[in-house]
Amino acid sequence: MDLTNKVVVVTGAGSGMGREISLELARRKAKIALVDFRKETLAETEKMVRALKAECSTHLLDVADSAAVAKLPAAVTKALGEVDALINNAGIIQPFVKVNELSMKDAMHVMNVNFNGPLMLTKAFLPGLISRPSAHILNVSSMGAYAPVPGQSVYGASKAAIKLFTEGLRSELMNTKVGVTIVFPGAIETNIAANSGMTAMTAESSESNFPTTKADVAAKLMVDAIANNKPRLVIGKDAKTMDILSRINPLYAAKLIYKQMASLLK
C-alpha cells in the first residue's frame, strides 16, 4: 500500500510507539487520525505531525469506551475522509505483581484496553475498510504473547488474545483487499509503565537486562510492514530470540525470562 494521502487511524498516538508511528506516517504523506486518552500528549503529537506538513485530526478517546469507539469512524471520516488503515497500538501493562495479588479490577482493565479495545475498533472500522480499494489493519501484540513474564501474566494473556484474533481475522479477510499484520515488539524504549499508571519496573522497561529497540526504529518497521503487506513482524533481538526459543524449548525459555525478571516482583 502506498501511504501517500491515505487516511490512517493510530491509537495510543500521544506518546511512545504511537507517536513515532504517527510521525513516520506523516513523513510518508499520509493523513493521520491521532487517537489517545491524554489531551496534553495528544496535542504534542499533533504539533509534531503538523510540523512535518502532514494533515491530521485529533480524537480524545478511551479505547475501552464502547460508545466512544462506535462514534469514531464517522468523526475520522468527517475530518479526513474515508479510512484506509487502522493501527491498534494503544496498550497498557498490569501492576507488576503475581496473579494471586492482582485485583480483578486491574485484570479486567488490562483486558479491556489491550483486547476489547482493538476488537471494538476493528469491528467499528472494518465495514469501511472492506469497501476501500486497498486497506490494512495492524495490531500490536508483544513478545509477552509467547514468552511468559512473571508478574505480567494477564498482560501476556491479553497480548496472546490479540495474536490469535489477528491471525483469525487475516484468514477471514484473505479473499479481500484488506491486509492484516500482527506485530510482536520486544523491549521498546517507551514510557508504557507511566502511561499505565505505574512506576515499577516492567517487562518492556529499558532498564531491564533485555536489549531494547528505539521507538522510532520500531515505528518505521511497522509502517514498512503496512506498505509491504507483511503478515507478521517481530521487532528486536530479544523478541526474535525468544520467538525461536519458546518454540524449541518453551520451559527453558520461561526459566530464562524468570531469572531476568523475577527480582522485579513485589
Image: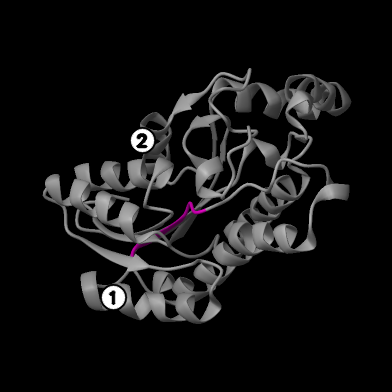
Relative depth, front residue between 153 and 200: 200
Q: Earlier in the sequence, mark 2 or mark 1?
A: 1
Q: Position of residue 50 (x, y in %)?
A: 15, 51
Magenta range: 84-90
Which quadrant would residue 258 be assigned to in this image? top right
Q: How is the image coloured?
A: one colour
Left or right? Give the position of 175 relative to 38: right
Residue that label 2 marks: 220
Q: Quadrant of the C terminus?
A: top right
Name the amino acid, label 2: Lys
Relative depth, front residue between 175 and 224: 224
Q: Considering the numbered disc 1 on the image, is that residue within a helix, a strand or a loop?
A: helix
Q: Position of residue 253 (x, y in %)?
A: 80, 24
Q: Position of residue 145 (x, y in %)?
A: 70, 42
Give the distance between the C-alpha atoms of the residues marked 2 and 1, in whole angstroms: 25 Å
Relative depth, front residue between 161 and 128: 161
Name the amino acid, label 1: Thr
In the image, residue 234 sits, relative to residue 11, either above or below, namely above
Left or right? Give the position of 15 relative to 4: right
- In the image, what residue occupies the spot 48% across and 39% down? 191
In the image, residue 254 sits, relative to residue 126, either above or below, namely above
- In the image, what residue occupies the spot 64% across and 64% down? 112
Res. 85 visible in picture? yes
In the image, residue 256 sits, relative to residue 95, either above or below, namely above
Report the number of discs. 2
Q: Considering the numbered disc 2 on the image, is that residue within a helix, a strand or a loop?
A: helix
In the image, residue 18 sits, relative to residue 206, either above or below, namely below
**Badge 1: few (under 14), some or many (20 or more) residues near its Cα, within 10 Å?**
some
Residue that label 1 marks: 77
